[in-house]
Each structure stands twice: as structure tokens, then as C-alpha cells.
Image (tube, rainbow, N blue to C red):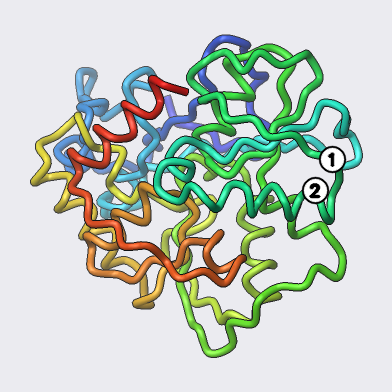
């Protein structure tokens, strides 16, 4: 059956089921099989004469969309809205920086919270990992820095609203920001935020306010694809590293703005210079991140278990 492209809002979130999206193959497919050979999780098969993607197996990485020679593999063209800023109950408003940021840049979460408290309102700190019950009352809003946190908090737990830190910061009028004149970058948009173009817009707005020149990559915004880190555990590390390098080579600039710690590590391995967005925001010097794939994921798993 031909896939009919439907733009707009995605299906309603089912509480308790992680809100994941997947790719589909349209009827323009020429049955070359390239996508099936490149899918890291074996989600693409041809059992009926046409290639199809199993939505239960798809990890929404976007690899198929990059390798397809005719553009037949596409993301579901739907979006998720953030809670409207005016609808946030400030008595139930929390900032969660995410495990990776807290682990690798432990001083930054407090800087981010201080900025919220000074210019936005009385936001409370929340550091329970999104994989655990947040123990918050219904109607709470979590301002998040991590795309994975955004997805899990909004779907796994009843009554939790989400919005990105970057949407909030960009909305603050007259906010004094560092001047990064002379810096030219591409942007790697976190694949978990692929279905939130409002986040992409807020980040680009903030970069322009910091006088940063942007050169867009072919795969960015709603068409962004995974940096390769999400392939960890599905394929051998050598293949993960190859996919990381492939993704890094897609950026026209040496400097790449990222807003995910895993993407920081990936861009370093891919030979790029990552510019982590919170570091730019606070005019910080970036820390070295020499961890291997195994070291990074092992440290993160240990941190998640404790939080």
C-alpha cells in the first residue's frame, strides 16, 4: 500500500509507552535493498516483494533516509508540541538537566538553573533520571536539556508536561548573551528532538543572538539523523565508529553545535570540533572528553542506576 504523507500533529501519547517515532518506505522505492543492508537493528525486510520498516524495531536513527538513492525512506512527518510557556504552572515547574550533562559537566546544571531563576521564575531543581518515576504531581512541567528526557517524561509518566530549556531561554526578552562573533558553525540537531521543530528554531535564534554564523547541513532540523551513538549495542563498536565518522563528514563546518553529550563525544571521534550549546551560553571552555564508547556508556549506565 502506498504511504500517504500526512503533515501535522502525531497520534495522541499513550501514557506508559515511550513516545517513539519511526521511518517508513514510500512507493517510490526501487527495491535495491541498500537500506536493509545499512539498518543497524535489522528493522527493514522484504517479505512481500516490497521493503518495509518494522516500527517496533526501528530506532528512528534516519540511516535509511541517508543511504536511499531515490529518497524513498522518510521520517513520519509529524511533530510534538511543547507546553505553551503561558500555560506552565510555576508552582509545579522543574528543571532537569539530564544524566549525561550532570555526569560530565557537574557545574553546568546549577548555572542553567540560576539563569532560569533570575530571568524566568522560581524553577525547582529535579535530577531524577527520566527512566525512573519522577514522583511529581499531575500538571507538573519539566524544563529539559536532553531530547531523551523530553520524550520519556512526556510519555512514560502521567500528567507531566515538557518543554526544552532552549525554548524558555530564547523567549526571555533582552537576555544578555555572550558575543561569539567570528564563529561559523553547522548544527547537529539531536535526533530525539527531530519531531520538535520549535526546539530547532529556538536554538538557531539563540545562536544568531550570540552573533554566530550558521551554515546548515543537508540533514538538519526535522531531517536530522543520529550521530551514530544510538547504534551502540546493536552493532560492533567498529561499525558504530564508522557511522559516527560518516555523520561527522556530513557537516560543512569544522565547528558543530551540539546539545547532547553523546553527540559531543561522537563529533570528537568523527574529527569535528563540537561546540556544546550550554558552553556557548555561559562562555565556558569545553572540557576534554577522551572516553571510549564503552567507557562513556558504562559511566552513564552507572550514573542512571544511582539517579
Relative height, residue 16 to residue 254 (above, below) = above
Relative height, residue 191 to residue 203 (above, below) = above
Question: Which dot marks residue 278?
Answer: none
- Give the camera-side residue of 130 and 37: 130
Circles 2 and 1, Cβ within 8 Å, touching? The answer is yes
- Give the camera-side residue of 244 and 274: 274
x then y, percent, for residue 83: 78, 35
Question: In the picture, residue 74 is in which quadrant?
Answer: top left
Quadrant for the N terminus in the image? top left
What separation in Å lies between label 2 and label 1 (alpha carbons)? 5 Å
What residue is shown at x 63% (from left), y 66% (from top)?
204
Q: Mark 2 points at which residue?
A: 117
Q: Residue at the bottom extreme? A: 182
Question: Which dot marks residue 122?
Answer: 1
x then y, percent, for residue 150: 59, 33
x then y, percent, for residue 97: 57, 41
What residue is shown at x 70% (from left), y 39% (from top)?
163
- Callout 2: few (<14), some (14-19), or many (20+) C-alpha neighbours within 10 Å? few
Amino acid at each position: 500500500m502506498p504511504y500517504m504523507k500526512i503533515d501535522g500533529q502525531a497520534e495522541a501519547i499513550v501514557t506508559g509507552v515511550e513516545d517513539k517515532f519511526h521511518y517508513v518506505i514510500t512507493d517510490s522505492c526501487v527495491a535495491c535493498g541498500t537500506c536493509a543492508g545499512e539498518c543497524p537493528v535489522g528493522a527493514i525486510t522484504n517479505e512481500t516483494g516490497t521493503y518495509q520498516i518494522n516500527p517496533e524495531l526501528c530506532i528512528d536513527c534516519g540511516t535509511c533516509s541517508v543511504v536511499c538513492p531515490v529518497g524513498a525512506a522518510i521520517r513520519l512527518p509529524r511533530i510534538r508540541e511543547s507546553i505553551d510557556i503561558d500555560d506552565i504552572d510555576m508552582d509545579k515547574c522543574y528543571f532537569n538537566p539530564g544524566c549525561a550533562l550532570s555526569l560530565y559537566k557537574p557545574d553546568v546544571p546549577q548555572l542553567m538553573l540560576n539563569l532560569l531563576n533570575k530571568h524566568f521564575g522560581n524553577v525547582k531543581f529535579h535530577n531524577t533520571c527520566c527512566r525512573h518515576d519522577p514522583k511529581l504531581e499531575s500538571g507538573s512541567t519539566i524544563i529539559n536539556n536532553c531530547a531523551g528526557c523530553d520524550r520519556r517524561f512526556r510519555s512514560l509518566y502521567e500528567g507531566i508536561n515538557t518543554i526544552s530549556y532552549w525554548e524558555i531561554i530564547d523567549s526571555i526578552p533582552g537576555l544578555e548573551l555572550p558575543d561569539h562573533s567570528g564563529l561559523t558553525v553547522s548544527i547537529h540537531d539531536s535526533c530525539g528532538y527531530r519531531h520538535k521543530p520549535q526546539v530547532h528554531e529556538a536554538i538557531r535564534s539563540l545562536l544568531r543572538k550570540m552573533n554566530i554564523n550558521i551554515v546548515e547541513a543537508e540533514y538538519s532540523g526535522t531531517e536530522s539523523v543520529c550521530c551514530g551513538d544510538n547504534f551502540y549495542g546493536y552493532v560492533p563498536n567498529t561499525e558504530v565508529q564508522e557511522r559516527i565518522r560518516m555523520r561527522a563528514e556530513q557537516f560543512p563546518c569544522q565547528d558543530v553545535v551540539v546539545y547532547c553529550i553523546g553527540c559531543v563525544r561522537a563529533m570528537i571521534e568523527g574529527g569535528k570540533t563540537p561546540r556544546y550549546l550550554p558552553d556557548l551560553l555561559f562562555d565556558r571552555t569545553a572540557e576534554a572528553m577522551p572516553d571510549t564508547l564503552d567507557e562513556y556508556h558504562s559511566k552513564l549506565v552507572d550514573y542512571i542506576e544511582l539517579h
